[in-house]
Amino acid sequence: GQFMQLIRDDWQQKPFFERYSLPDELASRGFDAEFDAPGYLFRNDGLELYDAIGQFTSEFVGEIYPSDAAVANDAVLQAWATETSAPDRGAIPGFPNKLEDRATLIKTM
């Protein structure tokens, strides 16, 4: 009932990258790197892990897709983006309906 509506409303308000990107999520709450809190281990350790995963993802995408054009021309990847962002399918707010470059693919992964 009401609880599910509350969850649904929250889901629709936050875009994909803000919800699932640790740096963006922290910044939206005022806890970005500029916030002086050396003992804030969730942020500090979380960002180290986020960066390590990002490095791995960058290398992985670089191996599979040698250029932005290779990303843009991958029909399966584009179908995934279209379905995930479609209001009647995945309906993930803010999810790109096209993946046109490696940087966006890396951030999405």
Image (cartoon, rainbow, N blue to C red):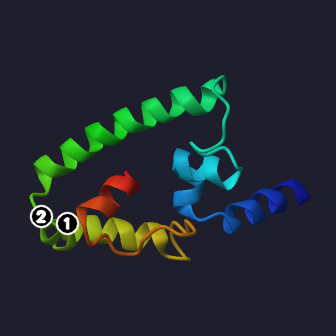
* Camera sees residue 97: yes
* C-alpha span from label 2 to label 1: 7 Å
Q: Is residue 35 left or right of residue 109?
A: right
10 Å crowding of disc 2: few (<14), some (14-19), many (20+): few
Farthest residue in the right direction?
2
Q: Give the residue at x 37% y 51%.
A: 109
Q: Give the residue at x 32% y 53%.
A: 106
Q: Is residue 41 left or right of residue 73?
A: right
Q: Nearer the viewer, residue 44 or 92?
A: 44
* Camera sees residue 1: no
Figure disc tally = 2
- Is 71 located above or below residue 22 in the figure? below
- Is 65 located above or below residue 50 in the figure? below
Coordinates of residue 41 in the picture (x, y in percent): 62, 24
Q: Amino acid at mark 1?
A: Val
Q: Which residue is tagged 1?
A: 71
10 Å crowding of disc 1: few (<14), some (14-19), many (20+): many
Coordinates of residue 24 in the picture (x, y in percent): 56, 53
Q: For residue 84, which quarter of the picture?
A: bottom left
Q: Is residue 19 left or right of residue 107?
A: right
Q: Give the residue at x 31% y 71%.
A: 79
Coordinates of residue 88 in the picture (x, y in percent): 55, 76
Q: Which residue is tagged 2?
A: 67
Q: For residue 87, which quarter of the picture?
A: bottom right
Callout 1 secondary element: helix
Disc ID at residue 28:
none
Q: Nearer the viewer, residue 103 or 94?
A: 103
Callout 2 secondary element: loop
Whether tag 2 and tag 1 are in contact, CB under 8 A, the answer is yes
Q: Amino acid at mark 2?
A: Ser
Q: For residue 44, which quarter of the picture?
A: top right
